[in-house]
Image (cartoon, rainbow, N blue to C red):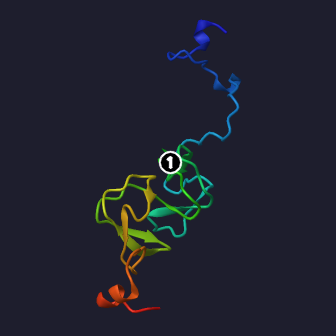
Amino acid sequence: MTASDHTAAGRPADSSRLSLPATDQAPVPPPTGEDDNSPELLLLAPEDDCLVLRTALPRGHWLRVSGRKVRLGDDLPVGHKIARHDLPAGAPVHKYGAVIGRTTRAVAHGENLHTHNLESTYMAAHRRGFSAADRADEGETAP
């Protein structure tokens, strides 16, 4: 290879001649659009603000979320939600095409959406420590 075969960054100009090192996961392809998501993610309805994990994923795992590369900040179990795009504090969150809650703070694109940054607006959820009597005092009825 001659000096003219390299780019200004010092890499070979013809990347088809490169051999990539083996890794335990495939590289994330370049962004292609809003509906371009890793296969580990499920979009339930086109208007949803979140994607659902199809499998448990470890902290540091790379995903493609709406065409952008995102690295998970936490270990996440199957079924958890990932923000499909940036959400401001107080924003309604859609899942299944319906509002399931409201953000309690700003949530970044690709961030985990759960009880630490999302409050339910359709039912009393995750109300640990409340007895049936406490819920009745607040106007809730038993199922």
Taking the spot 70% from the left edge, 32% from the top edge, the residue there is: 22
On screen, 105 above or below 23?
A: below
Q: Nearer the viewer, residue 116 or 48?
A: 116
The spot of residue 55 in percent (x, y) is 63, 58
On screen, 12 above or below 26?
A: above
Q: Quick one: SS at disc 1?
A: loop
| Dot 1 amino acid type | Leu
On screen, 9 above or below 30?
A: above
- Residue 84 visible? The answer is no
- Hey, which quadrant is residue 132 in on the image? bottom left
- Considering the image in quadrants, where does the N terminus appear? top right
Taking the spot 52% from the left edge, 62% from the top edge, the residue there is: 80
Taking the spot 32% from the left edge, 65% from the top edge, the residue there is: 91
Q: Answer with left or right where residue 19 lies relative to residue 125.
A: right
How packed is label 1: few (under 14 Cα within 10 Å), some, or many (20 or more)?
Answer: some
Q: Which residue is mark 1?
A: 72
In this rendering, the count of numbered labels is 1
The spot of residue 137 in percent (x, y) is 30, 89
The spot of residue 105 in percent (x, y) is 30, 59
Q: Nearer the viewer, residue 127 or 113?
A: 127
Q: Answer with left or right where residue 62 lies relative to residue 136.
A: right
Taking the spot 54% from the left edge, 17% from the top edge, the residue there is: 7
The spot of residue 94 in percent (x, y) is 43, 70
- Residue 97 visible? The answer is yes
On screen, 12 above or below 97?
A: above
Q: Nearer the viewer, residue 133 or 41?
A: 133
